Structure formats: C-alpha cells, structure tokens
Amino acid sequence: MIILGIDPGFADMGYGVIEVGGAGRSGRDRMLACGSIKTKAGEPIEQRLATVYAELARLIDTWKPARAGIEKLFFSTNVSTAMQVAEARGVIRVCMQQHGLACTEVSPAEVKIAVAGIGNAAKADVQKMVKALLGLAEIPKPDDAADALAIAIAVAHTRVPVR
C-alpha cells in the first residue's frame, strides 16, 4: 500500500511517499519519493494556493496513494503564518477529496509516538528514526520532507482514524 504524508505549509509544503511493506525488502517500508513544494514569495496568495493544489494533484496522479496523512495545524505566536498554513491545509484537503483520497489528520505528538516511541521526542530523533525505519543512507532533506515521511509512517502503522 502506498501512503502520502504531508507536512502542510504555505511557502514550503513537505511531502513523503512510502510503500508499506515494500516488495523484496523483507517487509520493510520504503521511501518512494520525498521533497517539498515551494511557492514564490510576492506572488498573489491565490497563485500560491493554486501551485500547492496543482503540485499535490501531480503527486497523487503519479504515485496513486491508497491513503494520506496530514499534520494537524499547530498554532504558534505568528497568527499571520498560521492563517496562511490553514488556507494551504484547506486546499490540500480539497485536492485530496477531489482525488478520492482518504486523509488522516495526525498531531505532532502522534507522529512522534509512532516513529520514535515518545510524544516529546526531539526533531533530530524523529529524523534519525525515519532514516532507520525506511533503510535510508541519510536523513531526508529538507526537514519538511523528513517530517512528511514521519507522518506517512504514522498513518501506516497506527490506528489513527480517518477524519
């Protein structure tokens, strides 16, 4: 089964695609793709959101995931950034729905527990576990991509309900 993980963002949205129990690898999950979708600062917000939609649609069409996961919105002190990320999350959810893709929301703590075994794990520890669990030579870059892979792993191996 192929799982798409999304670390939502407005300027930078991380994505990770894994195959659960990848063929020929002793049942180990494997990374199929990861990276980030970037939007250009200074472009109108509508264009930036359209870029997020189009690039996500391209990923879904390319990899044809059976399920997807997106990290729940974490509010920080920067309300402006939180609002932009919330708008991007809306576009992401609509894109997934229009492509018939079930989407599971996971909290940062749920991701950390699923990947590192503890809800307050450091970011570096989660990244090291992503590397180990997927049998990678290096920690995936950029950080948003590693986070998205962790989200995909969490969706694949926990009983977080589809919301």
Image (spheres, helix red, strand yellow):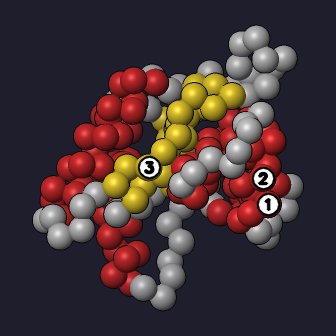
Residue pictured at 78% horizontal, 52% vertical: 128
- 47 to the left or right of 158: left
Q: Residue 42: where, in percent of width, then height?
A: 17, 70
Three-letter amino acid code at the position of disc 3: Ser
Q: Do the residues labelled 1 and 3 touch (CB within 8 Å)?
A: no
- 83 to the left or right of 67: left
Q: Name the residue that disc number 2 marks.
A: 128
Q: Are marks 2 and 3 in contact (CB under 8 Å)?
A: no
Give the mark, 1 or 3, whose residue is nearer the N terminus: 3
Question: Furthest-front residue in view?
Answer: 137
Q: Distance between the residues labelled 2 and 1?
A: 5 Å
Q: Name the residue that disc number 3 marks.
A: 36
In the rendered image, the vertical position of residue 9 relative to residue 96, given as above or below: below
In the rendered view of the protein, which quadrant contains the N terminus? top right
Determine crowd level at label 1: few under 14, some 14-19, many 20+ residues with C-alpha closer than 10 A: few
Q: Distance between the residues labelled 2 and 3?
A: 19 Å
Three-letter amino acid code at the position of disc 2: Lys
Q: Do the residues labelled 2 and 1 touch (CB within 8 Å)?
A: yes
Q: Which secondary structure, mark 2?
A: helix
Q: Is residue 158 visible?
A: no
Q: Residue 38 carries which label?
A: none
Give the mark, 2 or 3, whose residue is nearer the N terminus: 3
Q: Residue 96: where, in percent of width, then height?
A: 38, 38
Q: Residue 158: where, in percent of width, then height?
A: 74, 42
Three-letter amino acid code at the position of disc 1: Asp
Figure quadrant of residue 81: bottom left
Q: Which secondary structure, mark 1?
A: helix
Which of the pair 125/52 is nearer the observer? 125
Q: Name the residue that disc number 1 marks.
A: 125
Q: Residue 140: where, in percent of width, then height?
A: 62, 47
Determine crowd level at label 3: few under 14, some 14-19, many 20+ residues with C-alpha closer than 10 A: many
